[in-house]
Amino acid sequence: MKKESIYLDTSVPSAMYDERVKERQETTVKFWESVLPKYHVSISEITLEELKETVNENLRKKLMALTTDFKILKINKKIQDLAGIYIENGIFSARYFADALHVAIASFYEIAYLISWNFEHLVKVKTRRLVNSVNILEGLKEIEIISPLEL
């Protein structure tokens, strides 16, 4: 059986070492060990850029090491335009352009699932519905935006 594809936004690898919410960290570790191997995993240039912004050098190295085996998806003009359409349609505010980019990247590359711990802007029924309505109008496939708990 063919493996499905997943895209990880920055919140997922970051949760591996974030001890502020112990339950989320433990869930992420289990997700990393038992769920990720069942999928084709991708991240993007924006994920790497955000991880590189980690101030603590030791933590930054650990985070970057987590991503070495993942496919890195490139950002192009169509992706930037799609993120702009999400913003124009009020799905994301311009302030959260990076979130719009994560969704646009996963949508453009036809990734089945965007995995995130971002419940404020991404993992919401309303966001998923609005994104998918734009995607359909733009000739793209629908995407599932879910948390690691849902796979």
Image (cartoon, rainbow, N blue to C red):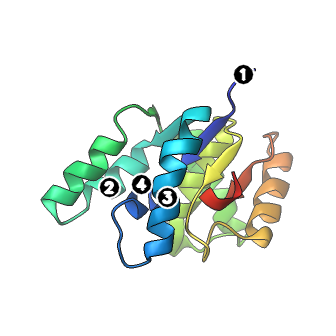
Q: Which residue is tagged 1? A: 2
Between disc 4 and disc 3, the foreground one is 3
Q: Which amino acid does label 4 sit on?
A: Pro
Q: What residue type is labelled 2?
A: Leu
Q: What residue type is labelled 1?
A: Lys
Q: Which residue is tagged 2? A: 51
Q: Is residue 147 visible?
A: no
Counting residues from the start of the chain, the first of labels 3 and 1 encountered is 1
Q: Which residue is tagged 4? A: 13
Between disc 2 and disc 3, the foreground one is 3
Q: Is disc 2 in contact with disc 4, using a CB cutoff of under 8 Å?
A: yes
Q: Is disc 4 in contact with disc 3, using a CB cutoff of under 8 Å?
A: no
- Element type where label 2 sits in the image: helix
**Number of the label disc, if any, that sits on residue 28:** 3
Residue drawn 80% across and 40% down? 141
- Element type where label 4 sits in the image: helix
The foreground one among 56 and 102 is 56
- Element type where label 3 sits in the image: helix
Number of numbered discs visible in the structure rendering: 4
Counting residues from the start of the chain, the first of labels 2 and 3 encountered is 3
Q: Which percent across, then down, holds residue 143?
A: 75, 48
The CA span between labels 2 and 3 is 16 Å
User: Looking at the rendering, in which quadrant would you find the N terminus?
Assistant: top right
Assess disc 4: are there few (<14), some (14-19) or many (≥20) residues with their C-alpha within 10 Å of its C-alpha.
many
Residue drawn 61% across and 41% down? 6
Counting residues from the start of the chain, the first of labels 2 and 4 encountered is 4
Residue drawn 25% across and 50% down? 62
- Element type where label 1 sits in the image: loop
Q: Is residue 41 left or right of residue 69?
A: right
